[in-house]
Image: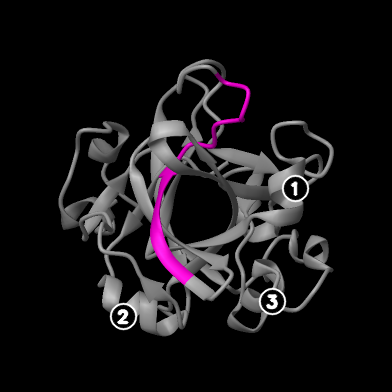
Amino acid sequence: MCGRMATTLPHDAMAQMFAAAPANDLPDVPNYNVCPTVQVAAITLTDVGRSYRPVRWGFIPHWYKKPNGGPLLINARAETIAEKPAFKAACRERRCVIPAAGFYEWTRLEDGTKLPWYIQRSDAAPIAFGAIWQDWGELGATAAIVTTGANEAMGKIHHRIPVILEQDQWALWLGEEGKGAAKLMQATGEDTLQFHRVDPAVNSNRASGPELIDPLDI
């Protein structure tokens, strides 16, 4: 599960890194508490190359009559994405990459207490989430992050992990190198990510500020 992230890197740097043409209406950065239903930046493939553009985090199937016409689809399970009616066409034709500085996950104690963690790449590079997208009415492009079973390291916090792409996998995921993206829908290496506890203030979707990702003094 991936339900909250941090986007802190300048859009011009991200567009350059992904060799994508930037749109003019990108969401504000930095944002240390990106929640579902808000706009995030994504790299999609167009007829003239890669585009770095805003998408709504929360995939809306074409048959929804209104944005809240069914469950909020912020993630798509790798194990079933190719068969689910909501996702199967996008899985084949509309894959995208969502870059982020990091993301949050929670462990839950027996008494129900939720302990938040901030997760980022060990090499300090941006995380490139494998995602899918499609247009929906006046909201434009909407997207879901693909998840799979956690590796051993992530499994200590949560049983699911987002699909995290390495640079040499971006072209295949976007469809520039033909078919075979399904093989990328697996957990990243055990050493790719690092984790630290953060203040429970991030449990609120109204929290903001760089202190949200600071290591908790415990």
Identify whether 124 is placed above or below 165: below
Give the x, y percent position of residue 167: 58, 81
Looking at the image, can residue 211 be seen?
A: yes
Q: Is residue 53 magenta?
A: yes
Q: Is residue 89 left or right of residue 22?
A: right
Identify whether 112 is placed above or below 31: above
Display colour scheme: one colour
- Residue placed at 39% from the left, 42% from the top? 116
Give the x, y percent position of residue 194: 48, 67
| Magenta highlight range | 51-64
- Residue placed at 80% from the left, 74% from the top? 178
Residue, disc 1: 78
The quarter of the displayed image where residue 36 is located: top left
Q: Does dot 2 land on a helix, a strand or a loop?
A: helix
Spatial CA span between label 1 and label 3: 20 Å
In what quadrant of the picture does the N terminus appear?
Answer: top right
Q: Is residue 175 left or right of residue 37?
A: right
Q: Nearer the viewer, mark 2 or mark 1?
A: 2
Looking at the image, can residue 217 be seen?
A: no
Residue, disc 2: 13
The label number, if any, that marks residue 133 in the structure image:
none
Residue, disc 3: 176
- Of the pair 73 and 113, the residue shown nearer to us: 73
Task: Name the residue type under label 3.
Answer: Glu
